[in-house]
Image: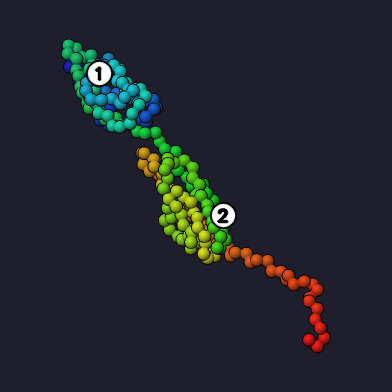
Amino acid sequence: PAACPALSFLSPATLPGGTIGQAYSYQLQTAGGIAPVSFNFMSGTLPPGMNLGEGGLISGTPTATGTYTFTARARDNCAPVNQTVQRTFSLTINPPPCPALNIVSPATLPSGTSGQAYTYQIQTTGGVGPLAVSLISGSLPPGVSISPIGVISGTAAGTGVYTFIIQVTDSCALAPQTVQNPFTLTITPASCPALNIVSPATLPSGTSGQ
């Protein structure tokens, strides 16, 4: 009989990655050979919660992260002798994607007053805690500082308009996310105490010649 077309794997050695807790499906691909082609698991480790079907479908819902290496074999229906090929594959299961990190505080912060205590918490959305907040450029008013958790506080010793850039970094397991926003903070002079004349309208009387 005519020789059967050579059987080979088309699927790459590094398979598309998956995400823990999300359904995964990938069909192993071959070229040549005589149909039907069957597949079986030879060695190594598939991600927990997943399996390789006889038809070559890798499927399931992975329950752990990591990179898993395994060897699969394909067998065709060539007569009189079936052809077999093997390939070692790598499959990475990633943690779930982290929510996008954003700074939502307004660019113009609430103003403060010279000589009076000031406090403001930088507001964010998304990301994965804990967050690290820092001043990366510009200057805060003298006497005012920012904490690692994003609290701007202190007693301003001067007046003026101060501009600065704040950076926030989260703890996303895939890769920490970093965002930066510029801010403006105005410190106004303290208001003067109201001026009043408190002497009575009728002054103390005096005596002629004295």
Task: Give amino acid for label 2.
Answer: Pro
Task: Give amino acid for label 1.
Answer: Asn
Q: What separation in Å lies between label 1 and label 2 (alpha carbons)?
A: 66 Å
Q: Are marks 1 and 2 in contact (CB under 8 Å)?
A: no
Relative depth, front residue between 149 and 55:
149
Q: Is residue 170 above or below residue 198?
A: above
Relative depth, front residue between 60 and 196:
196
Q: Quadrant of the N terminus?
A: top left
User: At x 55% / y 63%, what residue is drawn?
Assistant: 115
Q: Quadrant of residue 52?
A: top left
Mark 1 or mark 2: name the one nearer the start of the chain: 1
Res 126 visible: yes
Position of 103 with respect to 90 (left or right) is right
Return the residue found at the far right. 208
Residue 39 at x, y = what percent? 26, 18
Q: Is residue 107 above or below residue 47?
A: below
Q: Residues within 10 Å of mark 2 (few under 14, many from 20)?
A: few
Q: Is residue 72 above or below residue 198?
A: above
Q: Quadrant of the C terminus?
A: bottom right
User: At x 46% / y 50%, what residue is drawn?
Assistant: 150
- Which residue lies under the disc numbered 1? 40
Q: Is residue 194 above or below residue 44?
A: below
Position of 176 with respect to 67 (left or right) is right
Relative depth, front residue between 145 and 175:
145
Residue 202 at x, y = what percent? 80, 73
